[in-house]
Image: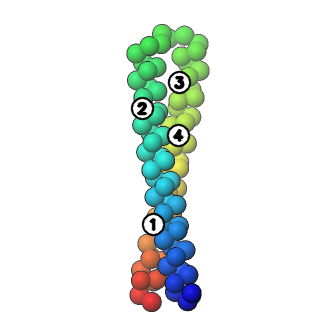
């Protein structure tokens, strides 16, 4: 396999991983939303509710961080894709 072929393969593999990361992030967002609905409809304002709300916020923040990282990786990949496609 030529260097250009290897670069294209690596770029495609990395792009697939980023796409999978985005998909996982969207699934987690849906789960967090579902969790918030259940919490708001079925729980009273107790200590358990407050603890779950803290966990909910932490998970949501991590999801946002992961989503931001995947977007940055995608932005960094774009110039590489242009260079590889020129070869």
| Residue 60: image location, x then y, percent | 50, 37
Mark with earlier residue (2, 4): 2
Cα–Cα span, label 3 and label 2: 12 Å
Q: Is residue 76 visible?
A: no
- Say which residue appears at 53% left-offset and 67% top-offset: 14
| Residue 71: image location, x then y, percent | 46, 58
Cα–Cα span, label 3 and label 4: 12 Å
Compared with 53, 24 (above or below) is below
Mark with earlier residue (3, 4): 3
Indicate the secondary structure of the residue bearing disc 2: helix
Q: State the count of labels.
A: 4
Cα–Cα span, label 2 and label 4: 13 Å
Indicate the secondary structure of the residue bearing disc 4: helix
Q: Which residue is mark 4?
A: 61
Label 1 Cα crowd, 10 Å radius (few <14 / some 14-19 / many 20+) = few
- Say which residue appears at 55% left-offset and 18% top-offset: 50
Q: Nearer the viewer, residue 6 or 39?
A: 6
Mark with earlier residue (2, 1): 2
Res. 33 mark = 2
- Say which residue appears at 48% left-offset and 55% top-offset: 20
Cα–Cα span, label 1 and label 3: 33 Å
């Amino acid at each position: 396999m030529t260097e250009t072929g290897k670069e294209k393969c690596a770029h495609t593999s990395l792009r697939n991983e980023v796409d999978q990361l985005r998909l996982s992030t969207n699934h987690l967002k849906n789960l967090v939303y579902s969790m918030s609905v259940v919490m708001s409809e079925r729980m009273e304002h107790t200590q358990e509710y407050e603890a779950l709300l803290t966990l909910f916020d932490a998970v949501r923040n991590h999801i946002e961080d992961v989503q931001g990282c995947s977007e940055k990786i995608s932005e960094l990949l774009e110039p590489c894709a242009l260079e590889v496609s020129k070869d």
